[in-house]
Image (tube, coloured by chain):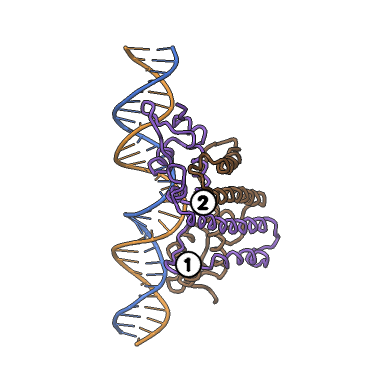
Chain colours: A brown, B purple, C blue, D orange
Amino acid sequence: MKFLDIGEVSARSGIAPSALRYYEQAGLISSVARHGLRRQFPPEVLLQLTLISMGKSAGFSLEEIAGMFGGNGTPDLPRAVLHRKADAIDRQILELKALRDTLRHVADCPAPSHMECPTFRRLVEATARRAAKPTRTEKPKPRAPR
Amino acid sequence: MKFLDIGEVSARSGIAPSALRYYEQAGLISSVARHGLRRQFPPEVLLQLTLISMGKSAGFSLEEIAGMFGGNGTPDLPRAVLHRKADAIDRQILELKALRDTLRHVADCPAPSHMECPTFRRLVEATARRAAKPTRTEKPKPRAPR
DNA sequence: CTGCCACTTCAAGTCGAGTTGAGGTCAAGC
DNA sequence: GCTTGACCTCAACTCGACTTGAAGTGGCAG
């Protein structure tokens, strides 16, 4: 009875109905009924959508996100995989901190060319060193996180 | 004299030559000469590429990255803008932490449906609350960070 | 009962970020 | 002096994530 019309979901989540349909097709969310033609979603969908946008902003593809939290909102993945994802996020946080610090430094450092500023180089090189260790021996292709 | 051939740059950075050419076209990096046809890059390009991949993994578009660190490797943006970018990254870090915690919780919580687990809801809702404050009054379009 | 309007489907289009393929060039090693 | 292999250009293609457009449907207001 207390289902949300797709328009409702769209309004509350800020996500276009077309995108919601797309997500449903991709198995990220699922509607439970129709009112006329209109999809009706269970209220949890709002939580799921939050999860989805978190995942997206973390650089995961919709497919990966679907893997983390299946259409039911519960993950179908083994714990170990989830922990590995979490670890990946931790590494990404480190990178983001480096980027943030670099940015702030660049904003404040009066040096004419940052490429010569030792602080700058240190910041960037620290990251380069971290990024340099290849996680997988197979497939050295960098595989952009999109 | 001590320039790097594009092949060298590709090998050291792990970025395909085609991508390097693409970046050059996009104004993110610039070659300084040719050896025959082959592009020669100054050594700083490796630093710039590190910056670029940091930016990419932070979810910035190539265009935004170009804005942060112009082709010269030095930013052409006013300090305030850079600081705002840094602040945006800080917000993203918070989101990532929430996602990571959610993931870890999901991996460990034995509850049958996470949608009912109060810890889970708290985690997600905390994020939703943060994400809910609209930064711009104009254009409520969420504008995925890609 | 009639409109209206937000939804529906399905196909096609768009945008960013590259990759791929055809046809060409060049400097280095044999 | 050839051949080879890695690069060159330019156009076309791919892929993910959606959006847009055309043509249709159905509940609700008047």
Query: Label 2 sits on what residue type?
Result: Ala
Viewer-closest of A73 and B58? B58
Mark 1 residue type: Gly
Q: Chain letter of disc 1?
A: A
Measured as percent of width and height from the top left, residue C8 is found at: 41, 66
* Residue C24, placed above or below residue D16: above
Position of residue A139 in the picture relative to residue A83 (left or right): left
Q: How many marks?
A: 2
Residue A133 percent coordinates (x, y): 61, 38
Q: Is residue B120 left or right of residue A146?
A: right
Q: Which mark is residue A30?
A: none
User: On the image, numbered disc 1 is attached to which residue?
Assistant: A14
Q: Determine the residue positioned at 58% across, 68% down.
A: B129
Is tag 1's residue or tag 2's residue first in the polypeptide sequence? 1
Is residue A33 visible to the viewer in this orientation of the structure?
no
Instruction: Kindly identify which numbered label has been placed on residue A107.
Output: 2
**Residue A68 falls in image quadrant:** bottom right
Circle 2 packing at 10 Å, graded few (<14), some (14-19), many (20+), is some
Please state which of residues A95 and B99 is positioned toward the viewer in this rendering. A95
